[in-house]
Image (cartoon, coloured by chain):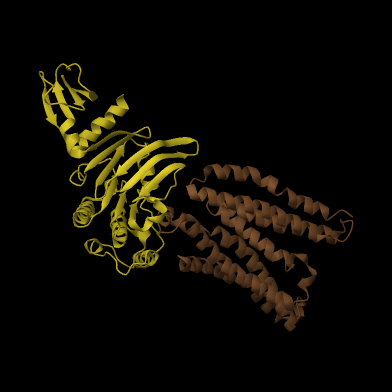
Chain colours: A brown, B yellow
Amino acid sequence: MLIKELRVSFRKAFNLFIVFLIVPIIYLVLSLFPGLNYFSIDGKDYLEVLLFFIWLITLLSSVFLGTSGFEYERRNDAFEYMLTFPFTKIKIITYKLFARLIILFVLISLFEFLYYFSSFFKKYSLFNPFYFPLICVLLFFLSFSFSLFEIRDLMALLVFFVYIGIFSLTFFLKRKGFYLEMAKIKPFFSSFAISLGVFAGISFSGLILTFKKFDISPFKKHLIRFLPYSLLPAFIGFLLNFIK
Amino acid sequence: MIKIENLSFSYGKKPIFENFNLEVKDNETLLITGINGVGKSTLLRLMAGVLLPDKGSILIDSKPVSESKKRIGFISDKMSLYNDMTVDSLIKFHKNIYGLESFYGSLIKHTKIKYDQKVGKLSVGQRAILHLSLILSQSPDILLIDEVLPNIDAYLRELFLNELLKVISEKEITLVLVNLNFYDIENLVDRVVLLKDGKIMVDEPIEYLKDRVKKIVCEKIPGKLPVIYRQRVGNLDEIFVYPFDDNKEEGDFEVIDLDLTEIIKAFIGGEYVN
């Protein structure tokens, strides 16, 4: 069971790796034409590109590894077959979580390793070596909780885009001078992490409870109702960026 | 022995069972039947540990279902299997999950199942045969089979049923079937449980039912008979009586013995009419 889950998780991360391999390839191709003046071909730059590439893969993997939790069973209509296995339901969830967390841990470790040697991205809080893994893990748990539902990809991607969207807006406003002080990223990150943490915590414990009974319909209604409130701390954090 | 005690289960706010009790003896073949939506498949899923009861307990030889899953083979009406896997990889996966060394492959030989074929590409009948082979590989003590037979073609259905008959005669297996078509399982069944509104309406050995459920054909319905269902055919009334007592009932009517299909039809028909 664990081997199957590891295989599924690895395949998921590997697919993302292949799809986004285009990022370093574009950089390499462009660096062959220094006349374009886009990039230098300094060895240090390659490291930064690699770091950005791993950052992107890790962030996306945290969402897609999460949503893949029960995707295979859902796609195959194999829930009942899985539930007859001679393990408890908690053990089934543990196997699934463990396999995915191993892959995520490898990606995060790679990110942390590259970050240590990086200089350029150290300026940006989006790459903060503490907040980024935290947000990835929270996104993973949230997405994993959604993997039982039909709307799992939509919900997980919504949270993912809220994260990217709010950060981009903060970054944009900062550049345009719409802030009162240097944009304080930390309040946003902390609040966003709290938001995700609350939501992931509730949805994950809900997942465990509903999975035990295998009746997800009442939980789904509560979860959708709860979503806007759970994102409230993130918006408060966002506003805090603009207060002196 | 399967012992269900004070079982309560609901889907959301819709109660299916409340304080439900049932015992299935070792090596017994039990048929669970009833009208659509009465909870037959739910009961089987609860016995298989796929669903968990809200209250009460389901024990297998005094142990909870969760501790006895290796002893249970369950085929649901959805015939849920990993469609993306090939037959060969599913067999390996199943052996791995249950720690098995061999696969019960004798049935597969008689079908057109190819080992490199995707499970999702198999016909319903082939899936049923594959699923039965998988669960027989784990040498279960209890077989729970939901309503899969009506969708299988005649050849594979006979193969499926003959194998079941062989297995229950050779090994000590408790078999619980959920079905609405009975003509081909009559020789398998020892006992019939008919569910109504989450409760047991009838729970009798099949021989007793055959002895006590009769069809009476008459022009005028005799009084005081325990009629469960009646229908008018031409000028005659056909009434289904339970329990029928040969010694007591006398009158100007013809008494006809019934097979299992007609017996169940009478009970279910009675539920719709009454």
Vertical placement of B229 versus A95: above or below? above
Instruction: Name, please, the residue furthest toward the front.
Output: B62
Q: Position of residue B172 (x, y in %)?
A: 23, 55
- The quadrant of the picture occupied by the C terminus of chain B is top left
Relative depth, front residue between B94 and B170 = B170
Residue B127 position, x and y percent, is 32, 56
> Considering depth in this image, is B72 or B270 the residue closer to the camera?
B72
Q: Is residue A20 visible?
A: no
Q: Quadrant of residue A98?
A: bottom right
State the image coordinates of residue A170 (x, y, percent, origin top left): 79, 58
Q: Is residue B55 left or right of residue B245?
A: right
Please state if B119 lies on the left or on the right of A175 as rendered.
left
Question: Which residue occupies 31% across, 67% down?
Answer: B115
What residue do we see at 36% from left, 50% from top? B62
Q: Is residue B269 above or below residue A20?
A: above
| Residue depicted at 78% across the width and 72% down the height | A122
